[in-house]
Image: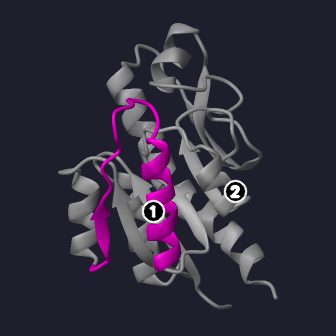
């Protein structure tokens, strides 16, 4: 099976990016990371890209807090196309993707979210689950569409909520599940893309 050309977008620590790159390096994921892009100048995700010798770039996001400026989104599409990316993985990318990206990569953008969608979309989903008194939460890999934390589900993994759980402990366990699930789910999508 041929390697699918992957672009990774992130805003933060890059733990899911590391899990993806380690999975590629080990041969478990048939993909090639072509570029890592962040909207945060000094985001640790860029250091992780450099550690794995993956081309990386900072994209100035513009004046909006939750989405890219239209011109910035056009620029990120150009950067991804210049890197010959086929599939885009959002790994802690804290901006809503709009039509320029969605039109350029139809059903080719995936995201991971720390809940069992459709439950608890949005920020700090693990805290939402605790407040709601859930007994089980988890993480979801899904295709990105025009709505926030929406789109067809690719894969999910459950994480139990333990008695006396804190938000921090629960979040750490969800992240462990994410690091296993995301490369596996990306592999599923890559297998579909690599079928002639």
Residue, x 28% and y 57% (percent of image)? 45
Tell me if label 2 and label 1 are in contact, CB under 8 Å.
no
Residue, x 63% and y 35% (percent of image)? 149
Q: CA distance from mark 2 to mark 1?
A: 17 Å
Label 2 or label 1, whichever lies nearer to me, is 2
Residue lying furthest right? 196
Is 4 above or below relative to 48?
A: below
Mark 2 or mark 1, earlier in chain: 1
Pick the quarter of the image with the N terminus. bottom right
Element carrying mark 1: strand
Is 117 above or below relative to 41?
A: above
Is 1 above or below relative to 193?
A: below
Residue, x 53% and y 78% (percent of image)? 28
Residue 171 location, quadrant: top left
Pick the quarter of the image with the C terminus. bottom right
Residue that numbered label 2 is attached to: 103
Is 139 above or below relative to 10?
A: above
Q: Where is residue 92 shown, x and y percent of the image?
A: 42, 45
Residue lying furthest left? 42
Residue, x 62% and y 57% (percent of image)? 109
Q: Is residue 76 magenta?
A: yes
Q: Where is residue 73 shown, x and y percent of the image?
A: 49, 51
Is disc 2 surrounded by few (<14), some (14 to 19) or many (20+) residues within 10 Å? few
Residue lying furthest front? 71
Residue that numbered label 1 is attached to: 8
Element carrying mark 2: helix
In this rendered view, identify the residue nearer to me: 142 or 184. 142
In this rendered view, identify the residue nearer to me: 75 or 180. 75
Q: Is residue 63 magenta?
A: yes
> Image check: 105 left or right of 13?
right
> Image check: 194 left or right of 44?
right
Magenta range: 53-82
């Amino acid at each position: 099976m041929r390697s699918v050309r992957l672009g990774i977008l992130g805003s933060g620590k890059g733990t899911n990016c590391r899990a993806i790159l380690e999975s590629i390096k080990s041969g478990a994921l048939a993909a090639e990371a072509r570029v890592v892009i962040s909207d945060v100048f000094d985001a640790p995700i860029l250091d992780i890209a450099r550690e794995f010798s993956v081309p990386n770039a900072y994209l100035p996001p513009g004046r909006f807090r939750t989405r890219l400026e239209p011109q910035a989104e056009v620029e990120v599409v150009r950067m991804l196309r210049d890197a010959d990316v086929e599939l885009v993985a959002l790994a802690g990318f804290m901006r809503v993707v709009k039509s320029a990206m969605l039109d350029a990569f139809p059903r080719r953008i995936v995201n991971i979210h720390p809940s069992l969608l459709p439950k608890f979309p949005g920020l700090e989903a693990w805290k939402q689950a605790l407040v709601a008194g859930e007994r089980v939460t988890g993480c979801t890999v899904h295709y990105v569409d025009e709505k926030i934390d929406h789109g067809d589900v690719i894969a999910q993994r459950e994480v139990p909520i333990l008695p006396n759980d804190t938000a921090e402990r629960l979040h750490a366990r969800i992240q462990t599940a994410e690091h296993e699930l995301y490369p596996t789910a990306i592999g599923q999508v890559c297998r579909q893309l690599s079928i002639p």
